[in-house]
Image (cartoon, coloured by chain):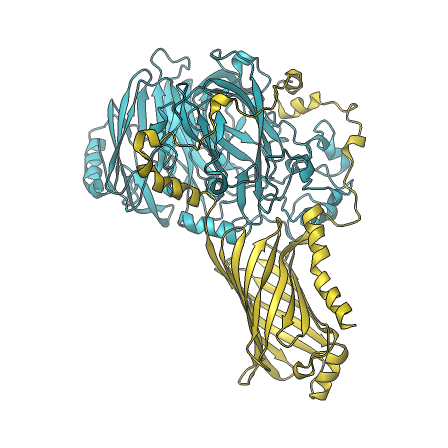
Chain colours: A cyan, B yellow
Amino acid sequence: MQVSINTTRRSLIKSAVAIGGLAAMPAWARGVSHGPIRQGFDEVSGRVIDLAVGEGPIAVAGRRGHAFAVNGSIPGPLVRLKEGEPVTLRVANRLAEDTSIHWHGLLVPFQFDGVPGVSFPGIKPGETFVYEMPALRQAGTYWWHSHSGLQEQAGHYGPLIVDPAGPDPVEADRDYVLMLSEFTPLHPHTIMAKLKKGEEYFNRQKTSWTDEYPLSGADRRMWAGMRMMPTDIADVTGSTYTYLANGHAPSDGLEYLFKPGERVRLRVINGSAMSFFNVRIPGVRMTVVQADGKNVRPVEVDEFQIGTAETYDIVVEPTGEAHTIVAEAMDRSGMAVATLASRPGARAPVPPLRDPVLLTMKDMGHGSMDHSGMDHAAMGHDMPMGEMDHGAMNMRDTSTLPADVKVGPGLDMVSAEPIDRMGDPGLGLDKIGHKVLTYNDLSALEPNDDSRSPSRSMEIHLTGNMERYMWSFDGKKFNAVADQPIRFAFNERVRVKLVNDTMMAHPIHLHGHFFELVNGADRMHQPQKHTVIVQPGGSATFDLTADEVGDWAFHCHLLYHMHAGMFQVVTVASPEGVA
Amino acid sequence: MRTVIAFAIVAVPVPALAQHEGHGQPEGEKPVDHSAMDHSQMDHGAVAATSGGPVLQGLKLDIPKPPEAPPPAAAGSGPPRAADAIWGAEAMRESREALARENGGMTLFWVQGDRLELRSREGHDGFLWDIQGWYGGDIDKLWVKTEGEGEVNGPLEDAEVQALWSHAIGPWFDLQAGVRQDLTGPERTHAVIGVQGLAPYLFEVDAAAFVSNKGDITARIEAELDQRITQSLILQPRMELGLSAQDIPELGVGAGIDHFEAGLRLRYEFAPEFAPYVGIEQEWKLGDSANFARLEGEDPSVTSVVVGVRFWF
């Protein structure tokens, strides 16, 4: 089915008829019309799929904006594919500007990866680009989005599921998608400009004379002395964002129906531009069964943090009449909400937002000074500071940096002791009182296919300057290294350590590959991911087998960080020696 | 004597700068020596207990780290052009340039009215503007600054405009150099060199030295600090210090500290871009400048009640 904005009216009539005829489209997926661009999504499948990128007005929870939409809805349609089968995806550009679709997490020939300037020239206005995908080599939950400009923020994204060729190891009675994202009436370029010009523009939780943060005067002076803010958790916040579940604002009342006793699979996709979410279902234990499309050994948790561009599949067995699914923004400035409902209209209480999060010593790169084993509460303050004169700490000792890190105005902090933080549950979740997922909890369900030890290691520093809103790898913005990619030999196995020299968490995404988190699991069961959160002031390490030939984007998936320069090209040499 | 003062003036911003860039901490304070701490007594197993995960972190330490090395020869060393072989170099060129431009190479335009205010001072009503703006990227910018004041229904007392090239010299400071043109009084053009940026403890600092076409050397240091009372209500102390290496009688400027201003403004940010304020400002002329003022029949010490607006876009 091909729907463009021009035919929205007709398709609305069609879907109205379809609803009247009790169509197969489930209620959670079906769009509810609030204007020319629908909220919610249809499903497209088959060997040939048509997608049309259009634009138009949208209204979300009473606020209006201009949006880019694929097949007339936000999110765009759920693209449902089958492992082992080829697919042809035809993308028509009905915009006045270039567009593209990147198939996030899909292993595809690099020329169909969909990154203008890296994989292909982009899709010109009026043009239809045909992605010819050979037989798919994977199954799982993924998503797709524009890689052109800042279109992703304006609605150009959608879910993607590849059904396994054989039986699914995850058994469930219901199979739902929960795609988290944001709506803002602001133009994405306006947001970018405000971030560049008005430092911490969107933060409405700054420290003040009247705040109630557990910070001593000494703490406050220390932060001011560093010219940084302990509340610098998210760059763009609920001050402009309405957080969305499948395109729906909390007030829309998105619901997933179940019968008590059923196993419900929720495919949680963070399709946001800039937000990490803390996901929980009060009263319901969640079993994580898949991360970034790869099945993992089931882990029971009460809550998990999902970084931008990550996916987690969970299975729940709800028993009550209704349960609220809470996806709270990491800085706690808002939440996306949906309901597991045993009957239409059933509702459970929505918990209030929890207290805003503050950064700690660990987040400043002084990891070994933050000994979680100590009872800091007994010391009379929540955070391990104040006893020492931390204002005296050197926050930018560049002597510890590798030679290939450029020291300049784009680097405002160096982590003095960056410890591995893959055992951390995420900002604000370390003292929450219930089980929160960490990367160290993950292990692959199926053994990995490469048992070799890495032959070399490399370190990449995540660098930034909050005040100037500059972001980069190794102190060099992409525009400075556009012709100096990160190089791998074909089939080379490399251990990559990402060191975060900033006070923000970065979800780092490598296109075209899965890497294995070095998280303490045995080598054959290191979990495979396409995106890894590197916690502030800490490090994360993965093993990569560079077995997909071509040029691949490698970037922070926070859209405005990428756009500010935290982007690189990874090139995997062809075994034939053709560059 | 003049030379000595001139050196002192020029030197003012420089040590401050070196300190900020080099250490990010006040001088005289030592960094914490982590090696001196005894970590062996701490229970690192407790880390896993608080985060709830299995005790895995220790295991990682046992994995031998492979050598850090450059990529093998098989990784190639030419430019990244894999897509050219498929789509053609010409087809790729435009999007490749756009990608570099969009991912880190953007330029912006910013204008800020830091102070646009009416001032009531002992029966005389005056006005003042202090506007600055830039165009450019992260490192290099063209700055334009203008400020001036006068009496309502009266003549302009002071007015100037500066055009400066600005270059980032560290995470928080820009070096600025250019020209200043005075628009009132005896015609004067100045060469300008200065620094502008964010000092530790979040002071916004703008310090500049001026050499005029008459050979006069002067300097100006301004500092502001935002004290957030609530998310929208902000108290801003501000100080300005004027220095001169010599008497300039035709301008009423005396050698040494020419003038000192201290202000306190309370603004309310209806939006971060738009904030009206009220405040009070005290100005003292000092030394010979005070004498020049008295000769003109002016009071060298003036208190003003101000009301104005701060904006940017």
Q: What x and y, as percent, mark residue B56?
A: 63, 18
Residue A380 is drawn in which quadrant? top right
| Along the line of sight, the residue nearer the viewer: A112 or B77 | B77
Report whether residue A10 is seen: yes
Instruction: Please report the residue visible at 64 percent of the width from the left and 20 percent of the height from the top.
Output: B57
Instruction: Please report the residue visible at 36 percent of the width from the left and 49 percent of the height from the top.
Output: A65
* Left or right: B142, with A48 as reference point: right
* Left or right: B60, with B12 as reference point: left
Q: What x and y, as percent, mark residue A143?
A: 38, 29
| Along the line of sight, the residue nearer the viewer: B64 or B112 | B64
| Along the line of sight, the residue nearer the viewer: B92 or A123 | B92
Q: What x and y, as percent, mark residue A507?
A: 51, 33
Q: In this view, does A534 lie above or below B105?
A: above
Residue B155 is drawn in which quadrant? bottom right
Q: What x and y, as percent, mark residue A575?
A: 41, 18
Picture mark count:
0
Report whether residue A343 is seen: no
* Left or right: A259, with A202 as reference point: left
Q: In which quarter of the image is the N terminus of chain B?
A: bottom right
* Left or right: A146, with A316 as reference point: left
